[in-house]
Image (cartoon, rainbow, N blue to C red):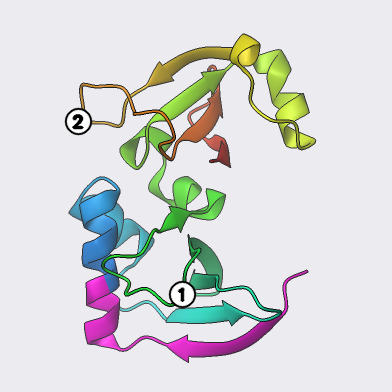
Amino acid sequence: AVAFKGETRLRGKEAKRLREAVAGRFGGEDVATTMLPSKADVVLKKVGGGSAAQFVFVDGECVLVQPDSRADVMEAELVPTLQALWRVGTATSMLPCVLIQRPVAKFIFRGADVMAPGVHSVVPMRGVEKLPAVGSLVAVCAVGNPSACAVG
């Protein structure tokens, strides 16, 4: 369980800036409006216990994690949660996708790392031709299932 030490509701202008940041990083306006609808209740919750992370909740669901809450939303690293990927439908509309073989999925669900022998292929983000760079944020999906099972 995560202990939150405070929360801030975003007003319209702040939510719009967050929506623009999401649109710029994760697949455009369509993805941003699906994740952060204009009339949604957007809340930032900071984590206690010496961590600098903050979580973005939209209508009660956690959709983004900002590892460094001291940075401005426009420049900060944003990591989508599985809930966010499930909201937009297919993972490749937000992130490049590493496809794993179906028998490997059960090990990933139990917390194993994704290793090269279990990788079937890598699919670039929709609308992008080149594959992701080493160290890039990717979604992990099982072959034949468009829903993500991990982000990393």
Please name which of the two marks, 2 or 1, marks the residue nearer to the observer. Answer: 1
Asked if residue 66 lies in the magenta stretch, the reply is: no
Q: How much space separates mark 2 and mark 1, taking CA atoms?
A: 30 Å
Quick one: label 1, few (<14), some, or many (20+) residues within 10 Å? Answer: some
Q: Which mark is residue 93?
A: none
**Image position of 144 with respect to 5: above or below:** above
Amino acid type, residue under disc 1 in the picture: Ser
Where residue 145 appears, x then y in whole percent?
Answer: 54, 25
Residue 90 in view in this figure: no
Q: Residue at x 31, y 22 (%)?
A: 131
Residue at 55 percent of width and 67 percent of height: 61
Return the mark for residue 69. Answer: 1
Residue 127 disc label: 2
Q: Which residues are magenta?
A: 1-17
Instruction: Give, as a three-letter code, the residue at label 2.
Output: Gly
Q: Is residue 54 left or right of residue 27?
A: right
Specify whether 61 is left or right of 107: left
Q: Does residue 108 show up?
A: yes
The local secondary structure at tag 1 comes to: loop
